[in-house]
Amino acid sequence: MEKRSLFIVLDGIDGSGTTTHSQLLTGFLKSKNYKVFLTHEPSNSEIGTLIRKYLKNKDIPPSVDALMFAADRVLHFYTEIKKKLNEGFIVISDRYVESSIVYQSCQSDDISLEWVKNINKFAEKPDITIILDLDPKISLARKSQEHLDKFENSIFLEKVRKLYIKRAKEENYFLLDTDDIIELVQEKIQTVVIKKLKSLQL
Ligand code: TMP
């Protein structure tokens, strides 16, 4: 990838605050006069829209979920993320490859982490990945109980959480406990990002 700006990803279990903190971080960086492009996965593409439907359908095989998420991501990367980075925007993505590595490999013993990485290999690595960590019992309590997606149950999310923590340690991601006042969590995220921007002289 041509070197340009900064690609930041916030990831974590459902209800851990990736959307709220991506939005707050966007506002903060804009207030510092950075050009910021905020995006999310599943994306707004037709594939992303179909994925949202599949999130309500327990009959979709996990391998199909994995392939759909990967297709949506690679499209998202080439048509939006890469373009914006090359235009000098800081890109913040609410979820990215790490969501697939963790969620899809937890869905089935037949889905290996290596395979998920492989089908996502065209989506280039972010500069910073921040994993927001929270007990699923707390994160699920933050959700409307009527419209839960197929992954939003505490047994599955407990498995997902453990793998996020393991991956964060192995990959040196920033792991932040979000069971705290929003402003304090956001301050920690901002500190990580500002440090990186300074080190890159951006
Ligand atoms: P959201 O609730 O953050 O919009 O994400 C939708 C759901 O999709 C959430 O349960 C996480 C899941 N997901 C995956 O399983 N794999 C992926 O690659 C992505 C991006 C999301």
Image: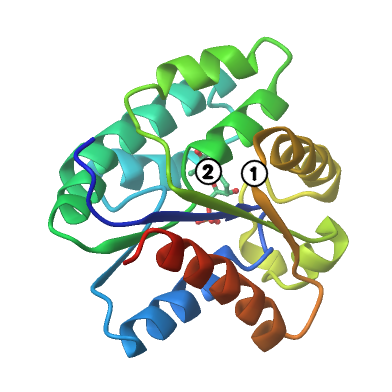
Of the numbered discs 1 and 2, the one sitting upstream in the chain is 2
Quarter residue 187 falls in: bottom right
Residue in the foreground of this view, choosing between 14 and 120: 120
Quarter residue 113 falls in: top right
Q: Quadrant of the N terminus?
A: top left
SS of the residue under disc 1: loop
Tag of residue 55: 2
Which residue lies at the image location 59% right of the left edge and 30% below the top edge?
A: 101
| Residue 82 located left or right of residue 200 | left
Q: Quadrant of the C terminus?
A: bottom left
Disc 2 residue type? Leu
Which residue lies at the image location 41% right of the left edge and 50% below the top edge?
A: 41
Where residue 86 sits in the image (x, y, percent)? 15, 50
Where residue 116 sits in the image (x, y, percent)? 53, 20
Residue 77 lies, with reference to residue 30, above or below; the image says: above
Tag of residue 139: none
Residue in the foreground of this view, choosing between 120 and 54: 120
Residue 197 lies, with reference to residue 80, above or below; the image says: below
Where residue 158 sits in the image (x, y, percent)? 84, 44
| Residue 130 located left or right of residue 176 | left
Identify the residue position indicated by label 1 in the image.
Answer: 150
| Residue 174 located left or right of residue 199 | right
Q: Is mark 1 within 8 Å of ligand 1?
A: yes
